[in-house]
Amino acid sequence: MDSQAAAQEKPHLSVSQIINMSVGFFGIQFAFGLQNANVSRIFQTLGADIDSIPILWIAAPLTGLIVQPLIGHVSDKIWLGKWGRRRPFFFTGALLGSLALFFYPQTGVLWIAAILLWVLDASINIAMEPFRAFVGDMLPDEQLTSGFAMQSFFIGAGAVISSILPYVLTRLNVSNSAPAGIIPDSVKYSFYIGAAVFTAAVLYTIFTVKEYSPDDLQRFGAAKDTYIIHIKTPVKKFLSGGLLWLIIGIVLSAVLFFYNKKHSENPLEKELYVLTFGLTAYGLFQIAAGIFLSKNNKNGLVEIMDDLNHLPNTMRKLAIVQFFTWFALFSMWIYSTAAVTQHIGHTKDTTSEVYNDMANWVNIMFGSYNGFSALFAFVLPVLAKRFSRPVTHAMALIFGGTGLISYYFFMSKELLIISMIGVGFAWASILSMPYSMLTQELPQKKMGVYMGIFNFFIVIPQILAATLLGIFTKHLFHGNAVYTIVLGGVVMIMAALFTLFIREKQHEKLL
């Protein structure tokens, strides 16, 4: 293959082709929207205290941390004939996720609900990660922003419908209240509908889009050695770096253990072990990679750890932005129900009509910000062309942070829809701009694994949020969840400031 053929540009896809690529994300976000808007409510209904809700959510980010890089790595390497390399994972994730959605609202035990959240989130991640890489596979550089913006539109549309489903069903005379410990029918039927939509939307993309073959990708610039593993990190660096992280993790775990033993009447939160054990595990993975490499065993673990040690420059900068952004988002998803029911509804009684009405309004709020994000998705390519992608993203995050802070000042539930305008602008950009800025810099042969690694910088702040937000809410804010939302708004504005340190290579053309 000559150099000219190897450098051949990918063909521009039509609007209808980009739509077909993105419909599957409608189903993914339908499931994700149901999860975000209802899981805290389900946990509280099954008896969870407000302080324990964050740690129950820990399954979601932990699952993404493990699943996404692994799925990305495997989908980069695999090719299953007519099925391709990304589409098998679309189907597997949709099937498993739909089953989890169907069984989730039938549980009446808190620990089973926590396990099913793990299963549901793992399934969503299996389907979602390859969809991100799919855009990089299929579109030329000039259409990346438009491709991710189209995904944002379908994400917003899916989340709107899924978020308002309990409210709509309630208006159709489906019961929205139930005895203590029982999940209302409005939530149950929403999950059943979500199971069907998840599968149908993903199947539509599978059957309407044909992936480029490995030979096609080579013509478009992918290296011929896609299936050959090249490791840049020396064995000594794997071992020494891993040992350092291992020691840090063990020492911090020991400090936490002995502090709590000495101050048993007022211990630090046990959720902090999630962080210390995570550092320990990272050190062990690095050491394991070094041991494998010393035996010339260049397996997937070695490659993923090596890729972590050699992140592209833009990814490093975006990592900081993502960290603060997703910490803020997680505060909203976890605490919006508690904040609205306390701050406006003035109740904590999960069996009361006021509580459930306010909880339903949170679904309307979440549906609203996703609806606004679907509209803003069409504006983002225009703003990116005019101002650059980093500036556009910074503007969106400032609006989002302001929207979260306004929770405190709006004392009627209807005014909170105004808050959701800012959040919606931010959400549209969060779902597209970072990926657009990043994808242009990634090598084609590692599109999947780097997209999976990029998810670390979404997952790690979620783990930190799930670990620390409960501490802040309980000890600093005395159980007043609205202050936790305000904190999230401040953190999102910090993310906007860090975005301005990113420099893009060029402006992209409109679709």
Image: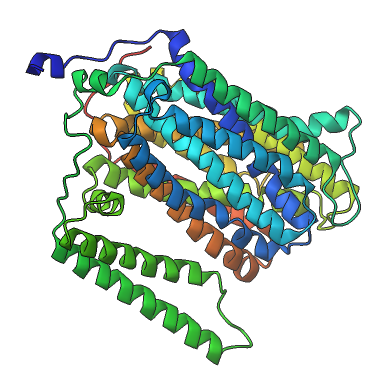
Residue at horizontal 56 percent and vertical 58 percent from the top: 58
Q: Residue furthest front?
A: 81
Residue at horizontal 36 percent and vertical 13 percent from the top: 510
Q: 235 or 509: which is nearer to us?
A: 235
Horizontally, residue 51 falls left or right of residue 215, namely: right
Image quarter (top left, top right, bottom left or bottom right) of the N terminus: top left
Residue 338 is at least partly visible in this image:
yes
Q: Position of residue 476 (x, y in %)?
A: 60, 68
Q: Position of residue 392 (x, y in %)?
A: 39, 29
In the depicted structure, whether residue 153 falls above or below residue 422: above
In which image quadrant can residue 249 be found? Answer: bottom left
In which image quadrant can residue 446 be found? Answer: top left
Q: Residue furthest bottom?
A: 262
Residue at horizontal 53 percent and vertical 30 percent from the top: 91
Q: 428 or 280: which is nearer to us?
A: 280
Q: Position of residue 308 (x, y in %)?
A: 27, 51
In the depicted structure, whether residue 245 falls above or below residue 405: below
Please give the count of numbered marks on the rendered protein.
Answer: 0
What's the coloring here? rainbow
Q: Position of residue 310 (x, y in %)?
A: 21, 49
Horizontally, residue 479 falls left or right of residue 486, namely: right
Q: Residue furthest left?
A: 2
In which image quadrant can residue 284 be found? Answer: bottom left
Q: 1 or 150: which is nearer to us?
A: 1
Residue 392 is at least partly visible in this image:
no
Image quarter (top left, top right, bottom left or bottom right) of the C terminus: top left
